[in-house]
Amino acid sequence: MSVLEDIILGVRDDIERRKESVPLEEVKRQAVLAEPAIDVVKHFSSHFPYISLITECKRSSPSKGVLASIDDPGALASIYEKAGASAISVLTEERRFHGSLADFDAVRANVSIPVLRKDFIVDPYQIWEARAHGADFLLLIVAALDDVLLKSYLDLIHALGMKALVEVHTEEEIERALALGAHIIGVNTRNLKTLDVDITTFERLAPFIPEEKVLVGESGVKTLEDVSYYAYHGADAVLVGESLVTSNDTYAFVQQISQVKIGQGNK
């Protein structure tokens, strides 16, 4: 069993527990009452020519274990926003990443920029749940979904006024994402089977994604030079987590990397 498959088993168990606590009809009612989603695509375009920075609230990961305690996710998100972040990603997976919807709520209440629910979406309940909690966009992992589910989830996300960050790892997954109408495509340079990171994966896959799409670089960012690498190879946005939550000066690091210009970074 791969790491991804193992994580999804736990996610499904947690979904069933939440369904018992808050039935789908109640979640749908809350979703209808939520504030309208921010258009993340328009928001990112307003930062041009600078790369849009998606900063992440991330306590732990399967590859590194515990990264940071993050006692106050809302306060961390406020630092990100004030330093120049374009959006905030919040891990809500409980078992491997030690995240929660409570973390998401704390972030949503403290920032005015778009917020991404980053989780392993395998049930429509999670999409309604995300909207009920004020999500503006969600992560969909192509490797975790067949074409029927991916298309139906994209349609539901769009119907609820949100956007999807569609994550790919291979050329074949890019073809599937494009065929099904994905507009924001994230190239994750982490292998979900081995958890190894090869940042050059981005350079190899980026040419297969049309220029009119929003291209996001994911994983492997440790330094300003890594962000510049993504920018040089065409990223419109980059998602940064681990290096921010473990930084000695998170504010300064966010300020630095938010000033990288698209297409003008370093090889």
Image (cartoon, rainbow, N blue to C red):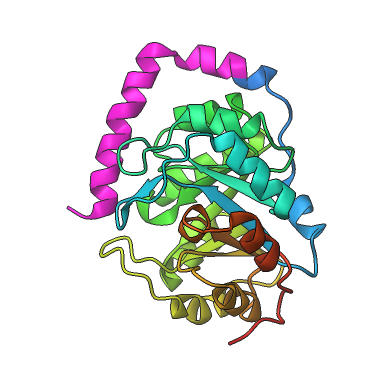
Q: Picture coordinates of residue 91 (x, y %)?
A: 46, 42
Q: Does the magenta stretch include residue 247?
A: no
| Overall secondary structure of the magenta section | helix
The relative height of residue 203 versus residue 177 in the rendered view (above or below) is below
Q: Residue 67 vs residue 29: left or right?
A: left
Which residue is located at x 36 percent, y 35 percent?
94
Which residue is located at x 39 percent, y 75 percent?
198
Residue 115 showing in the rendered view: no
Quarter of the image with the C terminus is bottom right
Magenta residue span: 1-30
The furthest residue to the bottom: 267
Which residue is located at x 61 percent, y 37 percent?
75
Q: Residue 187 vs residue 213: left or right?
A: left
Relative depth, front residue between 179 and 64: 64
Q: Residue 63 vs residue 147: left or right?
A: left
Q: Does the magenta stretch include residue 21?
A: yes
Q: Picture coordinates of residue 216 (x, y %)?
A: 59, 63
Q: In which quarter of the image is residue 211?
A: bottom right
